[in-house]
Amino acid sequence: MARFTFEADTVRAEGLEQLGRPMIRRIVEAGADAAIEHMRGRIETMHTQTGEMAGSVGKAEYVETLGGGSQLVYPLETDRKGVRNALKAYVINYGRGKKQNKDGSRSRMGDHFIDRDPDVERIVREAMERESDRAMREAGAT
Protein backbone atom coordinates (compact mmCIF):
# COMPACT_ATOMS: atom_id res chain seq x y z
CA MET A 1 0.00 0.00 0.00
CA ALA A 2 2.87 2.35 0.66
CA ARG A 3 5.99 2.27 -1.47
CA PHE A 4 9.08 4.32 -0.86
CA THR A 5 12.04 4.14 -3.18
CA PHE A 6 15.62 5.23 -2.79
CA GLU A 7 16.57 6.28 -6.31
CA ALA A 8 19.91 6.39 -8.09
CA ASP A 9 19.84 10.20 -8.26
CA THR A 10 19.81 10.37 -4.47
CA VAL A 11 22.63 7.84 -4.30
CA ARG A 12 24.81 9.88 -6.67
CA ALA A 13 23.92 13.18 -5.04
CA GLU A 14 24.91 11.98 -1.58
CA GLY A 15 27.98 10.06 -2.71
CA LEU A 16 26.59 6.76 -1.47
CA GLU A 17 27.58 4.83 -4.58
CA GLN A 18 30.93 4.21 -2.93
CA LEU A 19 29.20 2.53 0.02
CA GLY A 20 27.52 -0.10 -2.11
CA ARG A 21 24.21 -1.86 -2.21
CA PRO A 22 24.17 -3.08 1.42
CA MET A 23 24.12 0.53 2.63
CA ILE A 24 21.37 1.46 0.18
CA ARG A 25 19.33 -1.48 1.46
CA ARG A 26 19.94 -0.35 5.03
CA ILE A 27 18.67 3.14 4.17
CA VAL A 28 15.54 1.83 2.42
CA GLU A 29 14.79 -0.49 5.34
CA ALA A 30 15.12 2.42 7.79
CA GLY A 31 12.48 4.27 5.78
CA ALA A 32 10.27 1.18 5.74
CA ASP A 33 10.59 0.83 9.52
CA ALA A 34 9.49 4.45 9.95
CA ALA A 35 6.55 3.83 7.60
CA ILE A 36 5.53 0.76 9.62
CA GLU A 37 5.42 2.69 12.88
CA HIS A 38 3.52 5.57 11.29
CA MET A 39 0.97 3.28 9.59
CA ARG A 40 0.41 1.34 12.80
CA GLY A 41 -0.25 4.59 14.63
CA ARG A 42 -2.70 5.77 11.96
CA ILE A 43 -4.60 2.48 12.06
CA GLU A 44 -4.69 2.44 15.87
CA THR A 45 -5.93 6.02 15.96
CA MET A 46 -8.51 5.79 13.20
CA HIS A 47 -9.55 2.17 12.61
CA THR A 48 -9.08 -0.13 15.58
CA GLN A 49 -11.62 -2.70 16.63
CA THR A 50 -9.47 -5.68 17.55
CA GLY A 51 -5.98 -4.33 16.85
CA GLU A 52 -5.16 -7.23 14.52
CA MET A 53 -4.70 -5.08 11.42
CA ALA A 54 -2.43 -2.57 13.17
CA GLY A 55 -0.36 -5.33 14.68
CA SER A 56 0.11 -7.01 11.32
CA VAL A 57 1.66 -4.01 9.53
CA GLY A 58 5.04 -5.03 8.22
CA LYS A 59 7.32 -4.85 5.24
CA ALA A 60 7.57 -7.09 2.22
CA GLU A 61 10.86 -8.32 0.88
CA TYR A 62 13.39 -5.75 -0.22
CA VAL A 63 13.55 -5.35 -4.00
CA GLU A 64 16.85 -4.30 -5.48
CA THR A 65 16.55 -2.13 -8.58
CA LEU A 66 19.15 -0.95 -11.04
CA GLY A 67 19.55 2.39 -9.32
CA GLY A 68 18.57 1.66 -5.73
CA GLY A 69 15.87 -0.34 -4.01
CA SER A 70 12.32 -0.36 -2.68
CA GLN A 71 10.21 -2.06 -0.08
CA LEU A 72 6.44 -2.25 0.32
CA VAL A 73 4.82 -1.61 3.69
CA TYR A 74 1.30 -2.85 4.34
CA PRO A 75 -0.80 -4.99 6.73
CA LEU A 76 0.27 -8.63 6.39
CA GLU A 77 -1.40 -11.93 7.30
CA THR A 78 -5.10 -12.55 8.01
CA ASP A 79 -7.30 -11.80 10.98
CA ARG A 80 -8.94 -14.42 13.18
CA LYS A 81 -11.86 -14.68 10.74
CA GLY A 82 -9.54 -15.40 7.81
CA VAL A 83 -9.88 -11.99 6.15
CA ARG A 84 -6.66 -10.57 4.73
CA ASN A 85 -5.61 -7.46 6.66
CA ALA A 86 -4.31 -5.85 3.46
CA LEU A 87 -7.78 -6.19 1.90
CA LYS A 88 -9.41 -4.57 4.93
CA ALA A 89 -6.95 -1.67 4.81
CA TYR A 90 -7.49 -1.27 1.06
CA VAL A 91 -11.28 -1.09 1.44
CA ILE A 92 -11.03 1.37 4.34
CA ASN A 93 -8.58 3.51 2.37
CA TYR A 94 -10.25 3.47 -1.08
CA GLY A 95 -13.83 2.46 -0.28
CA ARG A 96 -16.11 0.01 -2.04
CA GLY A 97 -17.26 2.25 -4.85
CA LYS A 98 -18.44 5.70 -5.77
CA LYS A 99 -22.11 5.13 -5.08
CA GLN A 100 -23.85 8.22 -3.75
CA ASN A 101 -26.65 7.77 -1.25
CA LYS A 102 -30.04 9.46 -1.68
CA ASP A 103 -29.16 12.05 0.95
CA GLY A 104 -26.01 13.01 -0.98
CA SER A 105 -23.56 11.29 1.36
CA ARG A 106 -21.02 8.77 0.15
CA SER A 107 -20.96 6.16 2.88
CA ARG A 108 -19.09 3.65 0.74
CA MET A 109 -16.20 5.98 -0.01
CA GLY A 110 -12.86 5.37 1.59
CA ASP A 111 -11.27 7.81 3.97
CA HIS A 112 -7.81 7.69 2.29
CA PHE A 113 -6.05 7.41 5.64
CA ILE A 114 -2.97 5.94 3.94
CA ASP A 115 -2.57 7.36 0.44
CA ARG A 116 -3.45 10.95 1.36
CA ASP A 117 -1.56 11.06 4.63
CA PRO A 118 0.33 14.38 4.56
CA ASP A 119 3.03 13.28 7.02
CA VAL A 120 4.18 9.90 5.74
CA GLU A 121 6.54 11.09 3.01
CA ARG A 122 8.25 13.51 5.36
CA ILE A 123 8.59 10.87 8.10
CA VAL A 124 10.06 8.29 5.73
CA ARG A 125 12.38 10.79 4.04
CA GLU A 126 13.70 11.99 7.42
CA ALA A 127 14.33 8.41 8.59
CA MET A 128 16.16 7.62 5.37
CA GLU A 129 18.21 10.82 5.63
CA ARG A 130 19.20 9.99 9.23
CA GLU A 131 20.29 6.52 8.19
CA SER A 132 22.12 7.92 5.17
CA ASP A 133 24.00 10.37 7.39
CA ARG A 134 24.84 7.57 9.82
CA ALA A 135 26.11 5.38 6.96
CA MET A 136 28.24 8.20 5.60
CA ARG A 137 29.78 8.83 9.05
CA GLU A 138 30.54 5.13 9.49
CA ALA A 139 32.23 5.05 6.11
CA GLY A 140 34.23 8.17 6.95
CA ALA A 141 32.76 10.02 3.97
CA THR A 142 31.78 13.13 5.93
Image (cartoon, helix red, strand yellow):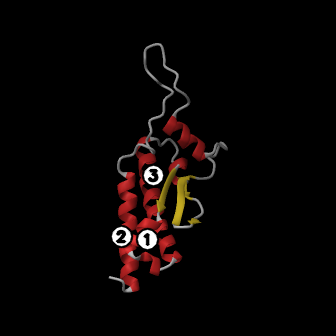
Q: Is residue 30 visible?
A: no
Residue 80 position (above or below residue 95): below
Residue lying at the far bottom of the rendered structure: 140
Closer to us: 31 or 33: 31
Q: Earlier in the sequence, mark 1 or mark 2?
A: 1
Picture residue at 42% right of the left edge, 61% below the top: 34
Instruction: Specify whether 122 is left or right of 93.
Output: left
The percent position of residue 105, horizontal first and vertical second, equals 43, 20
Picture residue at 50% right of the left edge, 41% below the top: 49
Q: Which residue is mark 2?
A: 130
Q: Amino acid at mark 2?
A: Arg
Q: Secondary structure at mark 3?
A: helix
Q: Amino acid at mark 1?
A: Val
Q: Amino acid at mark 3?
A: Met
Between disc 3 and disc 1, the foreground one is: 1
- Res 116 quadrant in image: top left
Q: Which residue is mark 3?
A: 39
Q: Earlier in the sequence, mark 2 or mark 3?
A: 3
Q: Which residue is mark 1?
A: 11
Cα–Cα gap, marks 2 and 3: 19 Å
Picture residue at 46% right of the left edge, 52% below the top: 40
Counting other residues with Cα less than 10 Å from the Cα at mark 1, is it few (<14), some (14-19), or many (20 or more)? some
Q: Earlier in the sequence, mark 3 or mark 1?
A: 1
Residue 103 position (above or below residue 84): above
Closer to us: 90 or 132: 132
